[in-house]
Amino acid sequence: MIVVNAIVKSSQEAINAMQSAIAAMETASRAEEGCLDYTFSIELSDPTVIRITEKWDNLESLQAHFNTPHMAEFQAAMGANPPESMDAHFYEVEEIHPF
């Protein structure tokens, strides 16, 4: 499984302007083959921070995701509302069940 964790620092105004683009990105991404989860979250302690969590069956599915029309649309929306910073990390993991 591939896990993506990203932290986006932005302004509340930019986040508000991006809400429909974020919702569309979540919905379209979750419908993609190989997508197990795709979620944007706003930190309760700092509403200018967005956390993005993605889970993919494999690297090929994630790579295909980068070439979708909804990714291009989301990137255009993000370009119109640029974040202060973005930090993304990609992990290959194995799910465990400790309990």
Image (cartoon, rainbow, N blue to C red):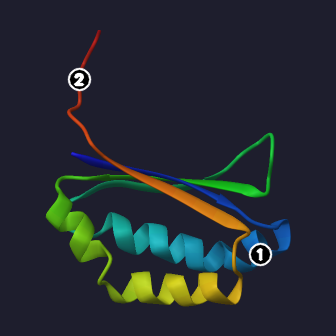
Residue on which the image places disc 2 = 96
Task: Indicate the position of residue 9 as horizontal and vertical percent values.
Answer: 71, 60
Q: Is residue 21 above or below residue 40?
A: below
Residue 87, percent from left and from top: 56, 57
Q: Assess disc 1: are there few (<14), some (14-19) or many (≥20) residues with their C-alpha within 10 Å of its C-alpha.
A: some
Q: Quadrant of residue 93?
A: top left
Quarter placement of the C terminus: top left
Check whether the beta carbons of the residues at disc 1 and disc 2 lie within 8 A of each other.
no
Residue at the spot x=50%, y=77% of the render?
Answer: 24
Q: Which mark is residue 99?
A: none
Looking at the image, which is closer to me, 92 or 22?
92
SS for dot 2? loop
Whether residue 6 is situated above or below residue 61 in the rendered picture: above
Q: Is residue 96 left or right of residue 79?
A: left
In this rendered view, identify the residue nearer to me: 51 or 16: 51
44 left or right of 87?
Answer: right
Label 1 belongs to which residue? 14
Q: Residue at x 67, y 73 (%)?
A: 19
Residue sitting at x 55%, y 71%: 23
Q: Position of residue 75 (x, y in %)?
A: 52, 84
First reached walking from the N terminus: tag 1 or tag 2: 1
Indicate the secondary structure of the residue bearing disc 1. Answer: helix
Number of marks = 2
Q: Quadrant of residue 56?
A: bottom left
Real-space CA distance between mark 1 and mark 2, rounded to the nearest whole angstrom: 37 Å
Q: Residues within 10 Å of mark 2 (few under 14, many from 20)?
A: few
Amino acid residing under circle 1: Ala
- Amino acid at circle 2: Ile
Q: Going 20% across and 33% down the picture, which residue do you hit?
A: 94
In the rendered image, which quarter contains the N terminus? Answer: top left
Does residue 73 appear to the left or right of 7 in the view shown?
Answer: left
